[in-house]
Amino acid sequence: MLVIYRILLILIVIIGAPFFLLKALAGRHGIRERLGYINKRNSSGRLFWFHAASVGELKILALIIPGIKAEFNDIDFAVSTTTVTGRSMAEQIFDESVMLFLQPIEIKSAIRRTINRIKPERLIVVETELWPLMLTAAVEEGLKTYLINGRMSRKSFRLYRLFRPLFLPVLRNFERLIVQTDKDGRRFEKLGAKNISVVGNVKYDQALGEKDISIPQVEFENPDNVKFVAGSIRKGEDDIFIKAIAEADDKNLPCRFILVPRHMKDVDGICAKMNMASINYILWSDYEEQSIDNKTVLIVNTMGELPGFYGIADIAFVGGSLVPIGGHDPVEPASQGKAVLFGPYMENAVEAATALLSSGGAMEVRCSNDILDFIQRVSEDRDTLKVMGKSCRNAVKMLTGASDRTVELLMKGDN
């Protein structure tokens, strides 16, 4: 199976060669780095190579790497990212002592070239970065491989099970898989993995430790209105919220809505639907410190500002959950002490959703009527929001500690 995988990848590279050449000529796409032509490491001694795909995974490493440094000052670190954008984010997170480069293309020669230039002791991948050739080549070059903050959704499990012969050797070669939940552990075990440890989700620690959230300065005509922030909403959810907004205005509920789409490409569609429903709105990019009146919805059409908008919320809705996508992370608003709402589809964050519901700080909603009923109830009893927000933050605190346990397991036997 691994041979077939390699052949397919080589064919893809050959077919895509003209495209890659154009990208290289355009510059800033890291073609040389992806082929393993990275700067040689200047120092000698131990080095851990971490691989992370997304911004969220980089933030996990922002806790794990300092945790290792605090105990072991003789270890160097390198971080690879899948995208150029990810690398740019890594440059903001880590200081110059951490080597940064783009993930080598999934061809053994490129991976070996990368390894020979930085000479790592370990390859540590984050969450779901199971690249068969990268991990296989690492083991063949004598590296120990680890998975941290590992997760395996039901959808991913079905896919991995279909290609189990390809991933079985990779999973068997891990020194340790450090995963988020018992369910994740069982799924990895069914795929053939051994040496599995369940420690929780490092993102809980990261969320509580977040200190540099930039709170947007927004002025409302009536600042006492309940501020409802619907974050990371997806197609289909916008229809539900447009209906809820129209009915809330008809009932004169003291609530102002802020919609934050998950994808900026959806903004135009939301605006068109707002126009059809005769709902006033203003885009965040057009906001110039004017007071937003009681009949206007704020639509956030800029990237990366959701945490700040959660900061001004009285009620935070977590998107991707009223439609069967699996839900986004509810920890972000919960860690800021906000009352949290989400829909029934929270498969991607089951542990957090269950903990927040059990604490009484979160509530599941299924339609616009549920949303309106909740707004009406809390607008008449604002203390409920404070109690729910406190319960959410306490629930997140109960879930923390995974970063310390991860570091302990990674460095087991090194003391």
Image (cartoon, helix red, strand yellow):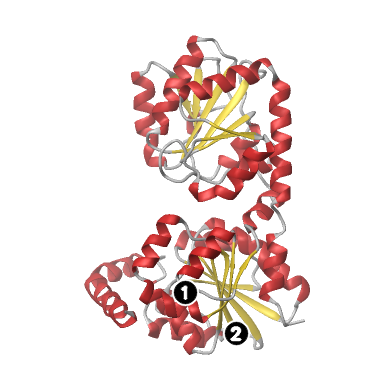
Q: Amino acid at mark 2?
A: Glu
Q: Is residue 117 above or below residue 99?
A: below
Residue 214 visible (yes or no): no
Residue in the image at 34% along x and 32% along y: 269
Q: Is residue 67 above or below residue 251?
A: below
Q: Which mark is residue 192?
A: 1
Q: Position of residue 3 (x, y in %)?
A: 31, 83
For disc 2, the neighbor class at 10 Å (few under 14, some 14 to 19, many from 20) is many
Q: Which mark is residue 349?
A: none
Residue 409 visible (yes or no): yes
| Observer-nearest of 379 and 46 | 379
Q: Position of residue 85 (x, y in %)?
A: 47, 59
Q: Amino acid at mark 1?
A: Gly
Q: Which mark is residue 121?
A: 2
Residue in the image at 36% along x and 80% along y: 107
Mark 2 and mark 1 lie on one chain; the one further toward the N terminus is 2
For the residues marked 2 and 1, what is the alpha-carbon distance in whole angstroms? 24 Å
Secondary structure of the residue carrying numbered label 1: loop
Q: Position of residue 213 (x, y in %)?
A: 66, 44
